[in-house]
Amino acid sequence: MSVGLEQSRTLSVPVEHLRRACQPLATKARQSAKELAAASCLGQARAVEALRFGLQLDRDGYNIFVLGPLGSHRHVLVEELARERAKERDVPDDWCYVNNFANPDRPRALRMPPGKGAEFRSEMSALLEEIRLAIPTAFEADDYRNQLKALEGESQREVQALWKDLNKDAEEHGITMLQTPTGYVLAPVRDGKVLDDDDFQKLPAKERKSIQATIKRLSNELKTRIESLPKLHKQYHERIRELDQEVTAHAVTVLIEDIKKKYLQLPDVLEYLDDVQRDIIENAKAFRTDEAPVLPFLARDPSDLFASYEVNLVVSNESDTPAPFVYEVNPSYPNLIGKVEYRAEMGALLTDFRMVRGGALLQANGGYLVLDAHRVLARPFVWEALKQALFAKKVSIESPAESLGFVSTTSLKPEPIPLDIKVVLVGERWLFYLMSAYDKEFNSLFKVVADFDDDLERSADNVRVYSNLIMQRIQEKDLLPFKDAAIQRVIEERARHADDSERLSTHIQSLDDLLVQADYWARQRSSADVDTDDILVALRGREQRLSRVQKRILDAIQRDTLLIDTAGECVGQINGLSVMQLGEFRFGHPVRITATTRLGNGDVVDIEREVELGGAIHSKGVMILAAALAARYARDTPLSLHGSVVFEQSYGGVDGDSASVAELCALLSSIADIPVRQSIACTGSVNQLGRVQAVGGVNEKIEGFFETCRKRGLDGSHAVIIPADNIKHLMLREDIIEAVAAKQFTVYAVRHIDEAVALLTGVPAGTRVNGGEFEEGSVNRKVEDQLVAYARKRREFAESAGAG
Amino acid sequence: MEYRPRILLIVTERSPLQRLWEAVEEHLSGTGEEVVALYVKDERWRRAASLPFTREVSRVSGSHREFTPQRAAQLDQDTVSQVRSRLGALAIRAELQPVFEVLAEHEVSRIRNYVRVEEDLLVISADVRSQPMYQELTQLSCRTVCVDAEEREYE
């Protein structure tokens, strides 16, 4: 009794289903320029709509998170749509930082209409140049010198008058004023000679008394005059200062008034110019200092004098340009928020408002800022700072240490600048879900989600537009023309990339890679266009470059290091199929799965799980197949089996349930003691009812087993069993198609475990006759009989143990 | 014995040392002149300090302090030390090693011992003119250069 030829034929997948070929394309339609442009949005209608919605809705929190895999051209599409929207928006204002004369540590932010910032900066620069010349000229004028001399003379006369009176008074009373290094000593003098104590005692008592009283009086007078000296000096300096201010005001007022006339509509600028005028006048002395300092290195650059009146233009926009679009590739804290720079001067770090630098937030203010989510999160403090800026709707330029309160030294705290920006975060899906789950503020700031699809339906219309997309990429990359057949082959490959013959991958980066590499090979053979062969060479070349591990595994199988039989039969042993993903390269290879069974308590041991090499999904698969076993056979008797399954020679982790069909078949083979054909490999998951379900990587798995068999020589017996639901995913290589067509290799598609069992054992699985026992001689009958036998033995064992 | 001309510098606590030294340097002929600095102490401090009621009024604050003989002696000592040090510094720059002597006011007659020939040069500051020793200096047979803080004049 064996599975008939008819059944095998029924289950074998027809050649035409192994790879869905692309139909010839309508060339004319493909070359329309408009369609080429539209093709860039192919398959992303939902994401594009979300982006447009997010870009147009100017409300708080309606920032956008763009989800999608790397290489899906998210950035390109975002830029395209954002720039389109930016044209409709008003050009944002310019921003300057200027000195805050009342509090230099808090630079002042000046807002100006677009384009005016640069104008104001150059006007201020010209003004300072004029002032630089006007002030010294005013101070060099004779009028100023005469007034200064008059003041000096007046002051000297006042000081001299103080001493003259005192000296005269002292001389009249026979007292001299001696100078010491630190002060004055009043002493009696007679005949030009200071009296000593002996001489003094010789004087009449009355005179001595008078001298002492006079000295005391003069000492007090002296003290009073010394005390009044600083006041005189101060008065003198104040007069000089007033004179200087008067001269400076005369020199600068006219110049500043000229500028003010241009900014009458900007009160903040007028106020600032008033401050500038006041400060220049108050510091008039500084502008006429021509004395060299005592230490040469202390000499100041003359331009430094006017530094505090310079304008630091941090945001500059042109009046006739669209709103800004900024993509910050390196969103570090300073690049995003801005920074205060420092200069080293004589061992100290100095800064001022001129060293405040705006970051991407300011550059994009009034427009759109695109950031990569993973970069934002990977750079310290950036995410928190971004959120803070978006919540506060203003940018405060300060160092992270300052914002966290870790710095106690004084630094600049520039006036915050109001923020009106749309931030677009671009990231992968897992990142979005993580941020969404772990940061409650995230959802209130990024309310619009633009989810980029990985693939699109392979409908006739979509294929046509996809060919336009390919043409557009070819044009953009400046590649050789592609023949129609080559484009068809590319489209087929895009279906393979999507792992689905009915869908096309929208991963633009991998499409670009294929096109560029095919172009390379065409050029290598000096061709004027790219043909199908170039596509194949590009594909095989890529595979070749990345297939070191795959080749090692195949070699190990060939050399019987990894034990895989591709001929003969064996009980409890089956060829499963495994897929390995190494970077961007995925390949399949066979793996031996074995099962053993004996009398037991009804448990099936997953050895991978026991040694913690099996993942949760794999364990689930094993538990499901155990349940399927228990539910299907000898339902009215206790399952008295102990089974174990294992992936032989597997030393790494195993996950996924795609081997559960193979594992169940191995178990059934072991229980029924029916050998499994080793020329067939099997993949698929099974549910508790024995239904075979679709799995991933089916193309790679088939190709993996095909390679193994091909190396040993195809003889027509070799085959792979896959779930019928996976037929739509088949996009197999041309050489496999050829082998199948030549009946050297077969792909079977099954819907139920029974079909797989029959194919693998060559024995019919068998159905229950009238709801009773399975058909005589079938696999299922043998399985059930064995399980009943186990149950009976177990009962006997229990009874004999109880009697004993 | 080889004759070396001598430049005699008369210094008091109020002398403009820089100007005096410049005058000395200007008169160096390169013939290996010997420079002798004579510091004449102002006896007036000592005399004033001997009086029990004299006070020193601070030039900075106007405050009073007792002016005792010890204070006068200390001032003398400090002044001599400062003058000596400053002259030493000036002389180093000119690569000279002047002899430094201190005379009390009543010893000024000893100055004539330092003048040996008419070729010697006496350099004084203008303030010396108002002091008793000036009479003594005018008796000397050598040339005299009188230096003011602003200018120098020859007599």
Image: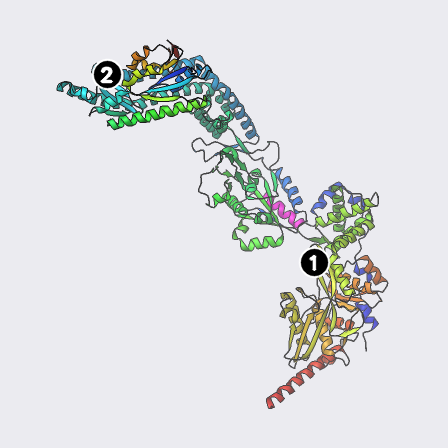
The Cα–Cα distance between marks 2 and 1, rounded to whole angstroms, is 113 Å
Q: Quadrant of residue B55?
A: top left
Residue situated in front as seen by the camera: A212 or A203: A203
Amino acid type at circle 2 is Lys
Residue B114 pos. (x, y %): 35, 16
Residue A210 pos. (x, y %): 16, 19
Q: Residue furthest front?
A: B1
Q: Residue furthest top?
A: B155
Residue that carries the numbered disc 2 in the rendered image: A193
Label 1 environment density (alpha carbons within 10 Å; few <14, some 14–19, many ≥20): few
Examine the structure image and report whether residue A45 is included in the region drawn in magenta.
yes
Label 2 environment density (alpha carbons within 10 Å; few <14, some 14–19, many ≥20): some
Magenta residues (range): A42-62
Q: Are marks 2 and 1 on the same chain?
A: yes
Residue that carries the numbered disc 1 in the rendered image: A581
Q: Quadrant of residue A27?
A: top right
